[in-house]
Amino acid sequence: MTMEGPVAGLLRSPSERPGPAAELSLLVDVGSAWTKAVVVARARGRWRIAGHAAQPSAWGEEELVNALVARLAEGADRRVADRLAELLGTAPRIACHTPRRAGRIGLAAVSAELSGASARRAAESAGWMVAEAATADDGRSLVDRLSALQAADVDAWLLAGGFDDGRADQALEMAGLVAAARGASRTPVLWAGSAVLADEVAALFEPGALQAVANPRPSATEEDLVPLRHTLEGLLQQLVEPGGVRQLTPVSFRRAVAELARSTERRVLGVDLGARYASWVLADADGTAESRVFAEGGLSASSLVGPGGPARLARLLPLAIDELAVADALQNLRARPGTLPQTEDELAIMHGAARQLLAQGAADEGAISGIDLLIGSGRTLAAAPRPGQAAQLLLDGVRPLGVTELAIDAAGALPPLGALDDAEIREGMGMLRDDLLTPLGAAVVCRGGHPGQVAMRVTVHRAGWPTTGPVELRSGQLQLLPLGRGQSAELEIELEAGVTLGGPRRARRAQVTVTGGALGLILDAREVPLSMPRRADDRRAVLAGWRDAFAREPSAPPPGDQA
Amino acid sequence: MTGPALHRVRVPRGTVPSVMVGSDVGPDQVLGLHRRASPAVRVQLATRLRVRPDAVAALLLVRPGTRLAEGDAIARGPDGREARAPTGGLLLGVSAIDGTALLAPLGPEEPVIGHVHGRIRAVEDGAITVEVPGALVRGVGGTGEAVHGELVVAVHDPGEELRAAAIDVGATGKILVGGSRASAETLTRARAMGVAGIVLGGVLDKELRDFEAIQRRRREVGGLAGAFGVLLLEGFGKVGIDPQRFGWFKAHAGRMASLFGADGLLYVYDAEPAPGRRTLPRVGERVIAHRRPFQGRAGVLVAELDDLHATPSGIATRMGLVRFEDGRLAPVPLANLEATLPVPPSA
């Protein structure tokens, strides 16, 4: 599987084989569970991805080199075949890694629903784990709150509460509680509460201990997490990974996605779902990017195995797997993240978990629309056994409204390339641009309409091919049409009343150009977010229908649907 | 043989340590004394200092978090008047609305026990590090508090389920080595009988959650006494303890042990090193499989297949051929296998 795509073609084509003078580089992403390595070779003046491999991180470097040699040996020039291990061992490498440990933060706020919720979201999306949270309305006595905060093992404290236009005495009390719990330790403290209280809160701590940040909840109706998130990201890097921030995968992934967006002038959403971490990067065509990093957002997320988690997941599986088996499988995935689902049931559970995590992340993001390219990274997404599974995970989890091209970072090259310095990242990604992503296809996702009634009509024009459609898609339906990798098509989309592609204007017609991929063109009129029948049998039938639709070869619609 | 393990005992901040670096400690020994805060009292500052409530914060002589003795000055007014602590306690903060200070008197000293035997290596605010000379067994999960007790093997076979009926008063204060599973009922009974902890090959996640829920409810109504921990060695589900490990436990029955359920650790004192595990087994090595359908089964890796092969789930990966102890021969992803290392001969 890892040798499919352009890589295999390169190795089998004698004219493109890396010869004895070939130059090699290694791109390595050391994850908490799996390490991904990509061999980049220059042959006849052009850099290409020559092969890639992935293995549990615990297996070590020597084994990784052996695996790469095994992948390359078949297609490599005979003159270098015997020296591949030596060449790979001495090749320059660009590496990144998952943070060795997550930063732990203690949170104190006035209200669990307002200031506490905003501060928690900002901290969790900046890569922190909230080790202890106390709010003035958490139902505990002040003494219990103090005991809990005293026992918390944290790298930093985050205080929040009060709107900017007024005082909040409770916020001061919570700050005092943290000052008491913190004792003589020199742990840094962030104040992200009422601006008018900043000086008073600072006076509770030794000089220089407290840093004030813009209030994420300046009023009851406003929320802006970005300044706090940026400060928390900086603090995390300074405390937990003081050197080589660029080499941290969440950072390097963001840089790579931003560069991709800039160079292609497209709006790109990248999702990297790992064993421990999940990163979401939304980059605009000008290269500016916002990222959210969840230290507990990967497949080991405690939210999956928490109360009600396994039952929720069992309900969303196309196979009849009971809640007990789902719970055990999820726990085993947490306990041994380097292992693989060997049975179909376990893979279904892992994919169900991935879908759920993506859906959680998408819900935090608000409605996701206007994305030109959605990239899936991380082993679960990028190394799904079939492209259809990867596409379904992305579409079911993220639900990107509008017309979006889907791709996976199959080799795992994006994060290491993002670790290049500013002067090199543009060049590095530019050279490998054709090999970086495996296109899955283009998706048209709409929302609205009445169940069972036509939601949209799509006509597909391809140069040199007869026009397809208009294909009528009823609300709740999913249809795949053939559109090969690299093939372009112009789509005419006509929406019924009440149906939208998520754009700012409620236009009834749209015309867009898309490029195909392994799945072709995916027309998706299912709900956003997905909704399912309540009866278990009906639900499983619907889920199995979707799974089968993604598993089938895309086919042209019956003649009746042709123009 | 690896050196002693370093174990970090978390202690509440503000704990006064009663041990020094280099001192030897036993599992029962008090490592420090901690005084919990009692319900806070409000101390009027603005009135005493004759200032506006919102001016009090600027007049504080001590910061929140300071431990005050009775009579210590909290704030001083512009005219030199002082407001003093009516009782000893922890200053939690001041209110700019009513000009009061929040003072939490400290309760009696409570001992902080490490539940671990060894030598103190570091004493910090919030943690005490102990060098533990015991054999360390790492689990994949667990629950509960730190406990210590004598190790007792409570089942005959590593694949046997630990039944509630097997637990009697003789198990009080002991750490029981069970088998492949224990129900929530068994765990609840064990705790009620005063068992210190249980070591299992596997447990159903649901049973463990039910047990935790029962404990939470009992704690809420105040009917829970003593500590209890569960350590899971192999995985979730009905999974037997690897026979090699089980043999090691049998050989060390009667030794003192410390179990840290939430951290997934067990130290057994005066013991030979426990059988180890290594990822990426080599052909000919004894292996243990993780993940279904072979979870917890032991065998021998007889071959590594060339190239990548697809598992029944469709994932293409490096596979090994394993002859399991029941005679079956099956391909298993190498990532799902661990070599079980033999117990090194004693020095």
Image (cartoon, coloured by chain):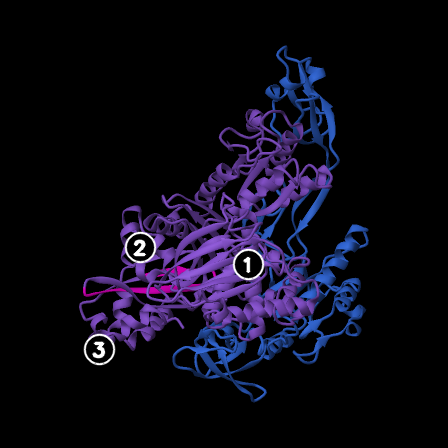
Question: Which colour represents chain A?
Answer: purple
Q: Chain of mark 1?
A: A
Residue B257 visible in the current orientation: no
* Residue A525 numbered mark, or none: 1
Q: CA distance from mark 3 to mark 1?
A: 52 Å
Using the numbered discs, state the Cα–Cα distance from disc 1 to disc 2 in whole angstroms: 35 Å
Which mark sits nearer the N-terminus, 1 or 2? Answer: 2
Q: Which chain is blue?
A: B
Q: Residue A265: horizontal and vertical position, in percent?
A: 35, 48
Q: Where is A532 relative to A136, above or below?
A: below
User: How far is mark 3 from mark 2, CA to CA?
Assistant: 29 Å
Q: Earlier in the sequence, mark 3 or mark 2?
A: 3
Question: Would you say B306 lies left or right of A144 here?
Answer: left
Per the rendering, the mark at residue A429 is 2
Nearer the observer: mark 1 or 2; the answer is: 1
Q: Residue B15, position in %: x, y?
A: 63, 42
Q: Secondary structure at mark 3?
A: helix
Q: Position of residue A227 (x, y in %)?
A: 48, 36
**Which range is magenta?**
A27-44
- Is B74 positioned to the left or the right of A459 in the image? right
> For the residue marked with disc 1, what is the amino acid?
Ala
B143 left or right, relative to A274: right
Residues beneath discs 3 and 2 located on the same chain: yes
Quick one: SS at disc 2? helix
Nearer to the camera, B282 or B253: B282
Indicate the amino acid at tag 3.
Answer: Arg
Q: Quadrant of residue A544?
A: bottom right
Q: Which residue is mark 3?
A: A78
Q: Nearer the viewer, residue B197 or A255?
A: A255
